Image (cartoon, rainbow, N blue to C red):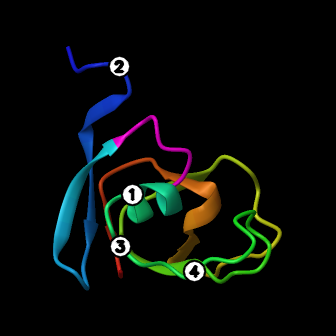
C-alpha cells in the first residue's frame, strides 16, 4: 500500500520540459504540484478568476476543487483550482 498522501496511479507529464512525476494527493492543486517541481507557471489570483495559469490539457481529465469563475475553454484547464482525475499531459 502506498504511503499516505501518495497516489501511484496518476502520472503528470509536462510536455515542454519533458518531465514526468507521480501525483501526490497532498498537493492542493496542479499549480502547487508544478511549482514544487520547478515548473514555471504564470499565476496571479490562485483562485480560478484571472486565467493566468490557463494551460493546454493535451491528455487526461481534471476536476475542479473550486468552480472557476473563468471558463478556460475546451482543451485547457486552470491549474490553480484543479486536480487530476487521470494521467495528464500538460503543455508546460
Q: Residue at x 45, y 58 (%)?
A: 61
Give the secondary structure at mark 3: loop
Residue 23's disc number: none
Q: Give the mark nearest the N terminus, 4 or 2.
A: 2
Which quadrant of the structure image shows residue 3? Answer: top left
Q: Position of residue 45 (x, y in %)?
A: 75, 71
Q: Are marks 2 and 3 in contact (CB under 8 Å)?
A: no
Q: Residue at x 75, y 63 (%)?
A: 47
Q: Give the mark nearest the N terminus, 1 or 4.
A: 1
Residue 74's disc number: 4
Q: Residue at x 25, y 66 (%)?
A: 13
Q: Residue at x 46, y 35 (%)?
A: 26
Residue 36's disc number: 1
Q: Position of residue 41 (x, y in %)?
A: 48, 78
Closest to the camera, between mark 4 and mark 2, is 2
Q: Which residue position holds label 2?
A: 4
Q: Position of residue 43 (x, y in %)?
A: 62, 77
Q: Are marks 1 and 4 in contact (CB under 8 Å)?
A: no
Quadrant (top left, top right, bottom left, bottom right) of the C terminus: bottom left
Left or right: 28 in relation to 64: left
Closest to the camera, between mark 1 and mark 4, is 1
Q: Nearer the viewer, residue 23 or 75?
A: 23
Number of numbered callouts drawn: 4
Give the CA distance from mark 1 to mark 2. 18 Å
Give the secondary structure at mark 2: loop
Q: Within 10 Å of the Cα at label 2, are there few (<14), some (14-19), or many (20+) other Cα atoms?
A: few
Give the secondary structure at mark 1: helix
Q: Which residue position holds label 3?
A: 39
Image: magenta residue range: 24-29
Q: Give the mark nearest the N terminus, 1 or 2.
A: 2
Name the residue furthest top.
1
Q: Within 10 Å of the Cα at label 3, are there few (<14), some (14-19), or many (20+) other Cα atoms?
A: some
Amino acid at each position: 500500500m502506498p504511503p499516505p498522501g501518495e497516489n501511484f496511479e496518476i502520472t503528470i507529464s509536462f510536455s515542454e520540459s519533458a518531465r514526468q512525476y507521480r501525483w501526490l494527493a497532498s498537493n492542493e492543486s496542479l499549480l502547487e504540484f508544478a511549482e514544487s517541481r520547478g515548473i514555471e507557471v504564470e499565476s496571479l489570483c490562485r483562485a480560478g478568476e484571472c486565467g493566468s495559469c490557463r494551460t493546454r490539457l493535451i491528455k487526461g481529465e481534471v476536476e475542479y476543487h473550486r468552480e472557476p469563475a473563468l471558463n478556460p475553454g475546451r482543451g485547457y484547464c486552470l491549474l490553480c483550482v484543479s486536480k487530476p482525475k487521470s494521467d495528464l499531459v500538460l503543455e508546460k
